[in-house]
């Protein structure tokens, strides 16, 4: 059986224990507060990120991994015996990560490196990675694992909600006055992935109604389909994610435990604390 390494980036929201279980390498997204640089999964997580944001009242910027970071990961994989590499990256529509991995792969002519644009974020990307890792563990070829990724991509449904517009306003994506007025009247955005980007789908009044709308959307996207995987990414809101899962269980046929995971700083800086959502892969 061919030894195939699996590599991704931290925007995949895969918990460390699962990455370790499948020997998945995660290349970190970088967080920049002015001249200060932090590495996702090393010296910053969602908790520390929003402590710093609230203390400084400013949003940091994010930076995709460099081609050199991927090059080092590819080199290490080959040195450890890999005969091929599958590298799944967050959507090229929102990050330079995919292009960085492509540039790195060019440094290994003749090597079997498949760089995949997931066209997804968070566990929408992460489930592609896990699907490939599980397939490889079961003896699949590199091409068969790539087909698993494609199958998961077209059957993935992502919806989320924001409890506050404060952080969107801080990032300049919404005027502070407009955000303040929207929070005053309890407008809660419903988000989804469209064309590889996290986009506004609807605006709902009150957090309770937003959660109910998330459940309705789950019913609509899974109608007459079997749920193969379900994950709930969140930003410093594990309780909210757990409650959302309980709501989903009341109306959906869910037989597996959910994967509840941190959204991760490279993404959460663009949404804000309190974010909850779900990623469902159907049959």
Image: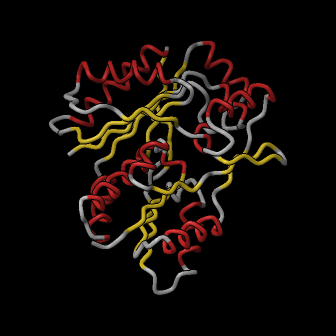
Q: Quadrant of residue 101?
A: bottom right
**Residue plotted at (21% across, 31% down):** 255
**Residue 270 location in percent, x, y?**
62, 39
Q: How many circles with numbers are drawn on the protein?
A: 0
**Residue plotted at (59% across, 71% down):** 71
**Residue plotted at (54% across, 49% down):** 10
Instruction: Report whether 6 appears left or right of 1.
Output: right
**Residue 24 location in percent, x, y?**
45, 55
Q: How is the image coloured?
A: secondary structure
Q: Is residue 28 above or below residue 56?
A: below
Q: Find the residue positioned furthest to the front.
A: 80
Q: Find the residue positioned furthest to the right.
A: 35
Instruction: Pick whichever, 206 or 255, lies toward us.
Output: 255
Instruction: Report whether 202 appears left or right of 157.
Output: right
Instruction: Pick whichever, 149 or 211, lies toward us.
Output: 149
**Residue plotted at (44% across, 74% down):** 113
**Residue 127 location in percent, x, y?**
37, 48
Instruction: Report whether 106 appears left or right of 131.
Output: right
Q: Find the residue positioned furthest to the bottom.
A: 110
Q: Is residue 253 above or below residue 98?
A: above
Instruction: Report whether 74 appears left or right of 260.
Output: right
Quarter of the figure that contains the N terminus: bottom left
Q: Quadrant of residue 173?
A: top right
Instruction: Pick whichever, 65 or 182, lies toward us.
Output: 65
Instruction: Pick whichever, 49 or 81, lies toward us.
Output: 81
**Residue 269 location in percent, x, y?**
64, 38
Q: Quadrant of residue 258?
A: top left
């Amino acid at each position: 059986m061919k030894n195939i390494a699996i590599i991704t980036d931290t925007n995949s929201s895969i918990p460390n224990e699962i990455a370790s279980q499948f020997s998945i390498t995660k290349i970190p997204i970088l967080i920049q507060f002015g001249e200060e640089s932090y590495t996702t999964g090393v010296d910053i997580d969602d908790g520390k990120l929003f402590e710093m944001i609230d203390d400084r009242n400013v949003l940091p910027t994010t930076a995709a991994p460099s081609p050199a970071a991927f090059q080092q990961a590819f080199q290490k994989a080959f040195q450890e015996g890999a005969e091929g590499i599958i590298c799944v990256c967050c959507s090229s529509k929102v990050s330079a990560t995919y292009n960085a991995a492509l540039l790195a792969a060019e440094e290994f002519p003749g090597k079997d490196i498949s760089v995949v644009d997931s066209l997804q974020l968070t566990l929408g990307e992460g489930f592609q990675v896990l699907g490939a890792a599980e397939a490889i563990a079961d003896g699949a070829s590199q091409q068969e694992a790539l087909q698993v990724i494609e199958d998961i991509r077209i059957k993935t449904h992502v919806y989320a909600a924001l409890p506050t517009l404060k952080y969107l306003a801080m990032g300049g994506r919404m005027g502070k006055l407009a955000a303040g007025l929207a929070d005053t009247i309890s407008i809660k955005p419903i988000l989804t992935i469209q064309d590889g980007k996290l986009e506004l789908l609807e605006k709902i009044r009150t957090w309770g109604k937003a959660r109910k709308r998330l459940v309705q959307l789950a019913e609509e996207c899974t109608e007459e389909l079997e749920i193969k995987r379900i994950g709930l990414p969140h930003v410093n809101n594990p309780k909210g994610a757990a409650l959302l899962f309980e709501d989903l269980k009341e109306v959906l046929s869910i037989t597996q435990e959910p994967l509840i995971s941190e959204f991760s700083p490279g993404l959460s800086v663009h949404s804000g604390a309190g974010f909850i959502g779900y990623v469902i892969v159907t049959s």
